[in-house]
Amino acid sequence: YIDLEWAIKLNRFTLNIAGLWPRNYENVYDRFLSDFRTTFSFLLIVFFGLIPSIHSLMRTWGDMIAKIDNLQFTLPLVIVIIKLVIIRWKKTDLIVALKMIADDWLKTKSEKEQRVMIKCAQNARTIIIFGYVLMIVGISFYIFLPCFGTSLRYMTNITDPQKILPLQTYYFYNKDQTPYYELTFIVQALLLIVASASYTGVNNLLGLLVFHLCGQLENLKERLINMKQYKNFCVDLTFIVEDHIRLIKYFDIIESTFNLLLLGLLLYFGILFCLYGFLIVTVLTEGKEMSMMRLIYLISIVLNVCSHMCLYCVVGEILVAQCEKVYYAAYDYKWYTLEPEKAKTLILIMIRANKPLYITAGKMFPMTLSMFCNHLLTNLRKKHCQQNTNFHM
């Protein structure tokens, strides 16, 4: 239980901020608080973030740099809303997946299997901590810099007439007057915290689920390799087959939950990468005025978005590699020395393990490093064509 708590507590803490942690609440009051936090987060992001941002986008439509500055907040808010809806919708399935994780940690296992699970959980925790650091640093810049009269945003006279807010938004009331400005500032700061926690927490939940699956596949591979040491071949093989089927069902939950989210993130990555690339190249080639601090900030955002997308593909690549190891473990077993009935049973495992478990974006694009490289090259070509078109015009 201590290892289980160590593995999931960071992710649970973040998702509990928005009430997204999948859990069966026996207490009616706790269930109400969870539903209230989710509803409050959704309404806060929609009515105080997304709608005012879209209103601001419409007012700055003629300014390309202002539009790009607006979309760097509007697009993530759209992704956060999609995550809130899907995670809440798939709550029952995720509860089943988390119960399987708890059963794997609590059941009797060898010391080697426990080390493998701890290693995979540590990888997931490292990613979570890294994501938390980026989230805290980003929120700190967005919230505290406007308090000193400066901001990393692109400032315009249309949406920022007097006092600076963390987000580029346009409200129906005069936000420069006291106490409207102070209240709006507090609401936007709270919105940034909730949205960042939801965005990062859901991504980390995917890492937690996939790395646990990788650890279980590695333990399954070791049991296949050492199967000749077991006394009863049929009983042990039955246990391995049942565990393999259980892991495939576990993967189906991950795939059905996150494939639409990954498709949205793939589109978001492509759009944002092209916009930021266009902005940075325009600044460097046309000599538009931009502070060095803001240029470094834009480059860091591009690298951050690329690293997040690359991370999803790396996790998918690791999962595919673990599936291949299970297949080769069954293939390298001396099945040809077994009795025909036993050999047939082992060959069935080989046939099923030969089909990799791909995490996909919208059930269309497998999240692998080759897909990431192809997507990155496509975006670079689009940006290059767009720059050539603007140059000839």
Image: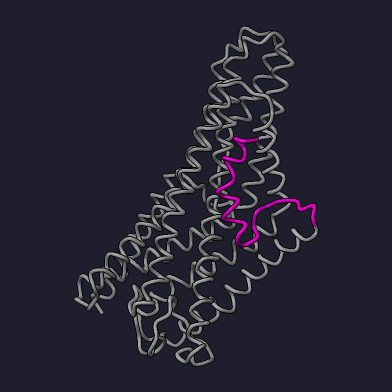
157 w.r.t. 190: above or below: below
Q: Is residue 95 magenta?
A: no
The percent coordinates of residue 347 (x first, y second) are 64, 21
Q: Is residue 262 above or below residue 241?
A: below
Q: Quadrant of the N terminus?
A: top right
| Residue range corresponding to the magenta coloring | 1-27
Tell me which corner region of the image, top left, top right, bottom left or bottom right, holds residue 157: bottom left
The residue shown at (47%, 63%) is: 268
The x and y percentages for residue 175 are 48, 89
At a point 70% along the width and 61% down the height, the residue shown is: 34
Is 217 left, or right, of 69 in this rendering? right
Q: Nearer the viewer, residue 376 or 92?
A: 92
Q: Is residue 97 above or below residue 185?
A: above
Quadrant occupied by the C terminus = bottom left
Q: How is the image coloured?
A: one colour
Magenta-span inclusion, residue 26: yes
For residue 108, side relative to residue 128 (left or right): right
For the residue pair 120 and 220, the one nearer the viewer reads as 120
- In this image, 208 relative to 256: left or right? left
Q: Position of residue 125 (x, y in %)?
A: 50, 43
Q: How many marks?
A: 0
| Percent of width and height locating residue 119 | 50, 32
